[in-house]
Every structure is written in structure tokens, then in C-alpha cells.
Amino acid sequence: MSEAQKVDDRAGAPEPGVNSLDRFFRISGRGSTLSREIRGGFATFFTMAYILVLNPIILGSAKDKFGHQLDPVQLTTATALVAAVMTVIMGVAGNLPLALAAGLGLNAVVAFQIAPLMSWDDAMGLIVLEGLLICGLVVTGLREAVMHAIPQPLKQAISVGIGLFIAFIGFVDAGFVSRIPDAANTTVPVQLGGTGALAGWPILVFCLGVLLTIALLARKVKGAILISIVTMTVVAMIIDSLADIKSWGLTTPAWPDKVVDTPDFGLLGHFSLFGAFGETTAITVVLLIFTLILSDFFDTMGTVVGVSAEAGLLDEQGRVPNLGRVLLIDGAAAAAGGAASASSATSYIESAAGVGEGARTGFANLVTGGLFALALFFTPLLTIVPLQAAAPALVAVGFLMMTQVKSIEWDRYDIAIPAFLTIAVMPFTYSITNGIGAGFVAYVLIKIVLGRAREVHWLLWGTSALFLVYFAIDPIEQILGVR
């Protein structure tokens, strides 16, 4: 049994009189309550429910090598099903408030980089292979060993970087920050609002939501994040019924024409495990799988550490409880996503919204997973929450995660510089993986130039070398003649 598991077991020692549900999930032992877990489960769902709309849009808008497109309705069903099943499994077996669903970024790679080279079945087969290989890394202990090899200050930097990243996601999703359309003719890549100024009712809903959320947090109101999401959704629905609004984005806060819809499971099982090798070169397939594994591997690592740290579940060495099981479930989720044609499923950093509501155990996942299961039949009803009402939660959680920056020793450059790069690169490149890679490479380099290379764990040498390949993948592909 690992030290993290021993700590978790001690922390979860049942108190006299607690019921079996409390004992199983260690709710009281982790300083939580059933009501907090339920609120946390709802908050996590509402902050990531956008994937039910966004994943079908990304995958459904792309064509494979033969010009075929996936059906958006079937994609919605597949996305909800995988999220529901894997989130519940993570809650029961991993006992962490960590929800899973189709990974953003990974689905774009599948849609616009992999599918044009082969059929959809072949592309999803690669996702299944990726998930199985990740599970293999977990079974051999390599994935867990890498996480344990990371110095504690870098783990703290990862959490802080994710905090900034998740806040930036909130600002962008709500339209508070937007990309300048003709950025090539200006030195400013992003701007306030859509035109350089805040305009429109949707932005007002977001701004009021942020103010409401921080006011409730400052007053330490129980359920602050969930209260804000529900309140601003109602406000948005009222505004939408009274004002002429062109677009709210992905979801419109209006009562749907129908509440119940029949799920279509037509995409389940449509994958070819090794079909990709017959459609393109073996080198191309290997490089594609390598990119998928590296992104999934370190995105999950950052998310698990960040959410667990915010929940106060790390032990004295910064280890995550039940880490082996958590990583195995995450790898299985990737394979399940490919088998269902929903793209690779992974742990969601939006789970931090649930932690912000007080969730500390896997029971919150039963709530989140149950809502995704309901979405199979009630998708029209459960997707009326606009991003402008949910995004303030991400901004608030970003603040909560940012507070860990005080634990980093900023007067030690061998730690401070890699920590800074980790924190800065995540939001600036819109990628958890890029931030972790920049921090790793900088950490190893500084230890070398200071003559302290022996302090670097051998696994950090290996992962840093992989990150160098990851960052230089384009020239490597050109040298190998892949392009």
C-alpha cells in the first residue's frame, strides 16, 4: 500500500454513528458533508455541460479521408454516455471528485489532424490504442512514478498555472476576452469583449455573475458557486425573453421546444483498432499516437494534482490518494471514448468548480455522472445554462487555486524560474501540457548549468527528453519525410 493510500485510509477512518455511504466515500473523514458533495456535483456538471454541445460541433463539422461526417445527434449521445459512465466509475473506484468527459483539444486533434488521413473508424481505433497504452503505463507503474518524481514546488506551480488557465477559459468562453480577428496587423492578440469594449446582454450576465460569485464567496455563503450559476441562468432566460439577442454562443437560455429526446446509440462500437496502419505510413501513426499519449498523460497529471491540491487531499509528499486507480480509470476513459466515437475522454479541470463548492469525495461524481445520464434523455433541458452563467464559476475557482502560489520559494531561481514558466505558459498557450513541458525542461536545464544534475530524478530526464521531441515535432516530421 502506498503512503498516499495509508494517509487516505487514516483520514477516512469511520466516525461512530456514520452510515455506510459516509464510510464508503469517507465523507466525514475528509471534512465534507452530503449536502456539500451534492452541491459540488451539480456545480461540476454545470461548468462542463458545454461539452454536450461543443464535442458534437467539433467532431461533427469535420470530414474523414472519404468525406464522411459523424451524426451530431449520435455524437451527443456518445458524449453524454461516456461522461456518465466514466465519471461514476471514477467516483466509486477512485473516490475523487474528478469528472471525466471528451477532452477538448484532443477532439480537435482527432477531427482536424487524424480523421483527414483515414476513416472515422480508423481514427477512433487510434484513440482506443492510445487509451490501452496509457493503461499499460499505469499497470507498469511508470505513470504513477513520473508523478511522484515531480518536485513539490513544481506540483504547486502546476496547480497555480491551472488556476490562471481555468480563469482564462472562463473569460474566453463568456466572451469577456476575445481573439482579435485580424491579429496579424496588430501587436495585441486578444481584446476586451468582441470589439475592444464590453457590449451586449450576454456579457452583462457574465459580469453580474462574477460580481455575485465573489460577493457570495467573500461572505462565505454555502453553495456560492452553484447559487450564482442557477441565479444567472434564470436572469439570462428572462433577458433572452425580453431582448432581441442575436447569439448567446453555444447554448441559449430559452425553454426548449421539447424537454425529452430519445438517445441514439448508433456510433457505439464503430472503431477499427489497427485500420489506421493501412491508410497512412507507420511513422505517421506512431507520431500521432505519441502526440495523443503525451497530451493526455500530462493534461491528466496536471488536473489530478491541481484538483486534489485544491481539495486538500495531497499528503505531506504531495501525493494523490488512490493514484494508481485514478490513473487507470483515466486511461480506460480514453479507450472508452474512442470505442464510443466520442473521442478520448479525460479528467476535467472544471471539476475544481465542484471542489470550490466543498466536494471532497467521489460521491460528488455520482451526482455529476447522474446528471450526464439524465442528459441522454433531457439534453434540451439540461443545456439551457449559457456559458455566461457558468463561466463565473471558473473565474472564482481560478482565484481559489491561485492562492497556492504563496507556497513556492521565489527566492530560489532553480525552483522559481521553472515554476514561473509552468504558470505562465499554461494560460498563454491554452494548454496544460505545454506548461508542464516548459517547466520540466527549464528545471532540468537549470540543474545542469548549476552543476546539480544529480538532483534530477531519472524519470524527469526521460520526460523532459520526450517534451523536447513534443515541442520539436514539426521539424522532426519534416526530417523523417512524414510531411
Image (spheres, rainbow, N blue to C red):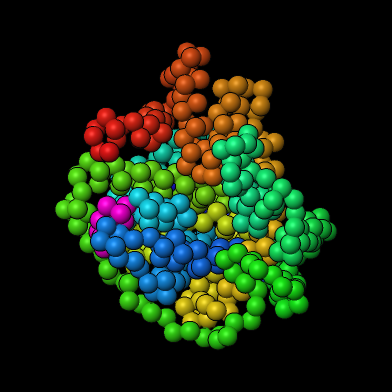
Q: In the rendering, at what x and y percent does residue 434 appear?
A: 48, 39
Residue 124 on the magenta segment: yes
Instruction: Residue 354: name its quadrant.
Output: bottom right
Q: Is residue 78 left or right of residue 403?
A: left
Q: Quadrant of the C terminus?
A: top left
Residue 289 appears in the figure: yes
Closer-to-camera residue (91/131): 131
Which quarter of the picture shows residue 340?
bottom left
* Total numbered circles: 0
Which residue sits at x=45%, y=56%? 103
Q: Is 212 in the magenta?
A: no
Q: Is residue 374 above or below residue 146?
A: below
In the rendered image, is residue 138 in sight? Answer: no
Range shown magenta: 114-126
Q: Is residue 250 above or below residue 326?
A: below
By secondary structure, the bulk of the magenta-drawn segment is best described as helix
What residue is shown at x 69% (from left), y 58% (from top)?
392
At which x and y percent is residue 394? 65, 55
**Left or right side of 338 for 323:** right
Residue nearer the viewer, 24 or 67: 67
